[in-house]
Image (tube, rainbow, N blue to C red):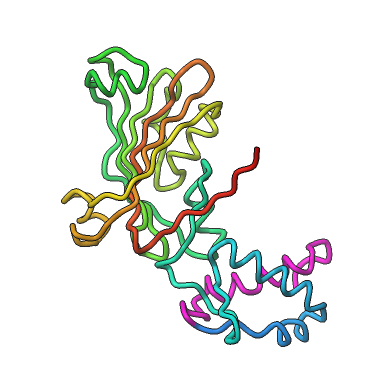
């Protein structure tokens, strides 16, 4: 099972991920028991337990006391409160990522947008709208404004191949970020692209990132509430 240099618990995780990503195990299907995995890989219960615990923390499986381990439903995928690439998060869960670009263009900043991005009212800024998918299901509506001084090549990026977050992390390295989270009903456009009803609550993250001396971007990230929960760990 894999390279001898790969820790055994990672080999167990890779085995489970592969079965899920290939569609062999569907959401709700049972994962082999700890005993079965111990026998298959010739490892201790502690090793198997570590692999399953990490898969739980990644949102790929869920454990039910007295019943076993099951493939997680897409409706309960977890997203940590970190500046992460949504493509990487989806891939880590063993699922298929895709994106549809609705808009990538220049536009003039309003007074409020200019204040948020640290540019004058009427200045040219970049605007993108991207829908992110997991296994063909829309999981994120991303509405982002970018300061051209921080990421001058933003409009040249192909956001079906690289996410806006990944482009910014590579071209406008993050030095500071702030965000707010609220429950909100989606707009008509957001609901249409997320394929949900307007009565379905969403988690809305508004995030402002800074790179060095400049504000880099202001993003409104809309997640269907039934398809996401957020988890994070903070340490002083």
Depth order, front residue of 175/4: 175
From this view, report whether residue 137 is shown above or below residue 19.
above
- The x, y position of residue 196, in whole percent, is 24, 62
Query: Whole-percent x and y of residue 23?
Result: 49, 77
Q: Is residue 162 above or below residue 30?
A: above
Residue drawn at x 29%, y 19% is: 114
Q: Indicate yes or no whether the magenta region holds residue 15.
A: yes
What residue is drawn where x is 53% and y is 34%? 169
Q: Relative to the observer, which residue lies in front, 164 or 75?
A: 75
Q: Quadrant of residue 104?
A: top left
Which residue occupies the extreme front position in the image? 236
Residue at screen point 55% across, 73% down: 62
- Asked if residue 13 is among those painted magenta in the image, a careful observer would answer yes
Q: Which residues are magenta?
A: 1-28
Taking the image as shown, residue 105 lies to the left or right of residue 5, namely left
> Can you say whether 75 is above or below 97 in the image?
below
Query: Tag count in the figure?
Result: 0
Q: Quadrant of the C terminus?
A: top right
Q: Position of residue 86 (x, y in %)?
A: 47, 50
Between 169 and 27, the one nearer to me in the picture: 27
- Quadrant assignment for the N terminus: bottom right
Q: Where residue 129 appears, x then y in whole percent? A: 30, 41
Q: Residue at the far top: name it.
A: 120
Viewed as shown, does residue 142 lie left or right of 190? right
């Amino acid at each position: 099972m894999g390279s001898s240099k790969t820790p055994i618990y990672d080999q167990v995780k890779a085995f489970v991920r592969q079965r899920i990503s290939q569609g062999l195990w569907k959401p709700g299907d049972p994962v082999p028991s700890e005993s079965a995995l111990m026998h298959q890989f010739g490892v201790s219960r502690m090793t198997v337990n570590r692999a399953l615990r990490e898969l739980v923390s990644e949102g790929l499986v869920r454990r039910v006391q007295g019943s076993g381990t099951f493939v997680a439903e897409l409706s309960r995928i977890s997203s940590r409160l970190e500046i992460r690439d949504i493509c990487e998060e989806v891939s880590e869960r063993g699922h298929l990522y895709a994106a549809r670009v609705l808009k990538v263009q220049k536009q003039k900043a309003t007074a409020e947008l200019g204040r948020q991005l640290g540019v004058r009212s009427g200045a040219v800024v970049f605007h993108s709208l991207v829908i992110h998918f997991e296994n063909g299901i829309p999981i994120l509506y991303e509405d982002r404004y970018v300061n051209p001084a921080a990421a001058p090549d933003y409009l040249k990026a192909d956001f079906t191949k690289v996410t806006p977050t990944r482009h910014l992390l590579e071209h406008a390295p993050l030095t500071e970020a702030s965000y707010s989270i609220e429950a909100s009903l989606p707009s008509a456009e957001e609901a249409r692209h997320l394929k949900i009803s307007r009565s379905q609550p969403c988690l809305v993250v508004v995030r402002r990132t800074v790179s060095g001396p400049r504000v880099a971007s202001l993003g409104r990230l809309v997640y269907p509430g039934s398809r996401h929960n957020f988890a994070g760990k903070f340490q002083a």
